[in-house]
Image (cartoon, helix red, strand yellow):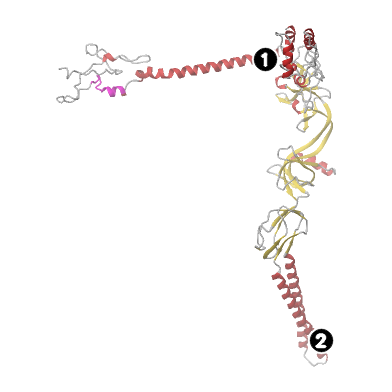
């Protein structure tokens, strides 16, 4: 071939599973098996067949380089083994794999650090270090036995004012939302048609009365004539019945007159009960009828008002026992949240049947509702006071624990260790819990920090032997501070009350802010040596006094006002004094 028709070299295609030619174009031996880690034959194992240029007019069909399977290069690439493209795909996945490995390493490191911290804390507590807890004394007190249920405000009377006659509404004398009394004028219907009907009935009555008078006179004459045998007896009898008929007609006329008078009275609509008027159902000038379902207006009685609620059948005997004894059971209504008191009333009655589907019985309580805080169809929380336990053991509700031993509390012993004590509970008011058995008055129970305790664990107590139990008024949380010698001190109490003693027994500051103790005495001594008079220090946390203290101290000393003294560990106090 000349240079113009020189063959074009096409890169050989490796076909897995088929014998490849040697360097001299001959077929090799049996094909090598393809398995894991085998990358297949190289490109040099495929022979090249010259292909004539496509622009050669004398050339016939172009010769295409084919492999030994008779496939074209495009077909060979399409059917190539996944092993041939594995290296390129793996190179794209390497960054994602490295990122995933780094994330897993970070997560594992965080988990190990957290576990080490927990183990260190657990080992510290297991080693006998006292744990800070809040405590309270078991006291004698009265505990009310109440039943809390959900009730609905139901008015004692709800009246839909309807017209009793048909006619045009000519007057409305009430305002929407107005309080009306029984008998107050509400609306007026046009009375003229009924006035005319009344006059007609009265005229008919006069006519029939005249006929009755004439019939009675004829009856008298007929009786005289019959006595003289002047007329037949039948004529007299007929006249007697005529008089009776006229008397009946007169009575009917009188009844018609009464009916028309009643219709005239119905034209004047008044309030049937005392209550609040609702929204007007019909406007002035409309023609109202007795068949109107909505009526003219609805009046609801608000004072007094009732609340209907349900009681469990298990509590029914206790309630009936109190009612049969003549006791008045107080009922208190609260809003939906149970925090705002809406009214106080008394239990009036119980239903005569128990609902088998719910196992409850309906009850009705009456409330005066003088301030109208109870609104019809309002959902309220009801508390029924059934009884009161007098002189029972009472502890804060936070002291009660539940677990494998059942219901129990942690009792603090004189050696500042706790013991698990099973108790039998009574009623509770949400903040206090009555204990029927298991405790004695004067015992100390743990109210805060019980989740970290176990039987026999060491704890620290408050300085007075008891932490505030429930709803403290002095702002302290009642959590005792950790003390190595067993002396009790409250961390939070010391932070809020400067005069409270610290764990080591050294007071931090008196009530007027004057610093006391060895630490502040040395600070005042240094100020006197520097020629500055010792000044009273305000309460901890003041930035201005902290800056003055920093300026008056030596350069290496730590400012005393930089942080509250109650939050500084007592173990670091000697180091600060040495500075």
Q: Which residues are magenta?
A: 65-77
Residue 67: name its quadrant.
Answer: top left
Please say whether residue 471 is one of the residues in the magenta stretch. Answer: no
State the residue in front, 392 or 503. Answer: 503
Judging by the rendered image, the residue that carries numbered circle 2 is 220
Judging by the rendered image, the residue that carries numbered circle 1 is 121
Q: Position of residue 177 (x, y in %)?
A: 72, 52
As drawn, the label of residue 569 is none
Q: Position of residue 518 (x, y in %)?
A: 79, 10
Q: Position of residue 52 (x, y in %)?
A: 19, 22
Q: SS of the residue at dot 1?
A: helix
Q: SS of the residue at dot 2?
A: helix
Count of residue discs: 2
Q: Is residue 432 visible?
A: yes
Please say whether residue 70 is one of the residues in the magenta stretch. Answer: yes
Q: Nearer the viewer, mark 1 or mark 2?
A: 1
Residue 169: name its quadrant.
Answer: bottom right
- The first of marks 1 and 2 along the sequence is 1
Q: Is residue 203 above or below residue 29?
A: below
Q: Do the CB atoms of the residues marked 1 and 2 lie less than 8 Å apart?
A: no
In space, the residues marked 1 and 2 are separated at their CA atoms by 126 Å
């Amino acid at each position: 071939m000349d240079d113009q028709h020189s063959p074009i070299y096409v890169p050989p295609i490796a076909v897995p599973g088929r014998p490849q030619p040697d360097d001299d174009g001959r077929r090799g031996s049996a094909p090598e098996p393809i398995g894991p880690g085998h990358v297949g034959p190289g490109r040099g194992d495929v022979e090249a067949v010259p292909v004539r240029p496509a622009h050669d007019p004398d050339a016939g069909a172009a010769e295409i380089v084919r492999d030994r399977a008779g496939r074209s290069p495009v077909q060979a690439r399409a059917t190539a083994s996944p092993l041939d493209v594995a290296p390129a795909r793996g190179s794209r996945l390497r960054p994602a794999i490295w990122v995933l490995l780094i994330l897993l390493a970070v997560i594992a490191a965080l988990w190990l650090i957290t576990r080490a911290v927990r183990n260190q804390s657990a080992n510290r507590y297991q080693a006998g270090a006292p744990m800070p807890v809040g405590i309270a004394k078991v006291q004698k007190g009265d505990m009310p036995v109440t039943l809390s249920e959900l009730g609905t405000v139901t008015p004692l009377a709800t009246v839909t004012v309807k017209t009793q006659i048909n006619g045009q509404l000519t007057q409305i004398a009430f305002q929407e939302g107005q309080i009306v009394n029984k008998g107050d004028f509400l609306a007026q219907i046009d009375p003229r048609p009924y006035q005319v009907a009344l006059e007609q009935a009265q005229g008919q009555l006069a006519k029939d009365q005249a006929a009755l008078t004439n019939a009675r006179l004829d009856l008298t004459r007929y009786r005289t004539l019959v006595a003289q045998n002047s007329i037949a007896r039948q004529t007299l009898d007929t006249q007697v019945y005529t008089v009776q008929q006229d008397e009946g007609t007169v009575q009917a006329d009188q009844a018609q007159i009464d009916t028309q008078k009643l219709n005239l009275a119905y034209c004047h609509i008044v309030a049937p009960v005392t209550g609040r008027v609702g929204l007007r159902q019909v406007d002035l000038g409309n023609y109202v009828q007795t068949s109107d379902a909505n009526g003219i207006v609805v009046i609801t009685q608000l004072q007094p008002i009732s609340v209907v609620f349900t009681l469990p059948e298990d509590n029914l005997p206790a309630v009936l026992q109190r009612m049969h004894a003549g006791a008045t059971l107080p009922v208190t209504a609260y809003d939906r949240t149970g925090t705002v008191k809406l009214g106080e009333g008394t239990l009036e009655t119980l239903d005569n049947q128990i609902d088998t589907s719910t196992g409850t019985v309906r009850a009705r309580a009456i409330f005066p509702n003088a301030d109208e805080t109870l609104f019809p169809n309002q959902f309220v929380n009801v508390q029924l006071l059934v009884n009161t336990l007098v002189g029972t053991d009472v502890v804060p509700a936070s002291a009660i624990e539940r677990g494998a031993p059942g219901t129990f509390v942690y009792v603090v012993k004189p050696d500042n260790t706790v013991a698990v004590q099973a108790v039998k509970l009574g009623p509770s008011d949400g903040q206090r819990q009555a204990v029927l058995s298991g405790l004695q008055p004067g015992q100390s129970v743990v109210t805060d920090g019980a989740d970290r305790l176990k039987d026999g664990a060491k704890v620290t107590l408050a300085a007075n032997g008891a932490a505030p139990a429930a709803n403290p008024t002095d702002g302290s949380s009642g959590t005792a501070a950790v003390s190595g010698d067993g002396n009790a001190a409250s961390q939070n109490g010391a932070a809020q009350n400067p005069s409270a003693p610290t764990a080591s027994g050294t007071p931090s500051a008196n009530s007027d802010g004057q610093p006391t103790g060895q630490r502040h005495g040395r600070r005042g001594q240094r100020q006197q040596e520097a020629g500055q008079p010792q000044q009273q220090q305000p309460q901890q946390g003041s930035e201005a006094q902290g800056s003055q203290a920093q300026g008056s101290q030596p350069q290496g000393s730590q400012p005393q006002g930089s942080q509250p003294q109650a939050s500084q560990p007592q173990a670091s106090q000697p180091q600060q004094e040495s500075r």
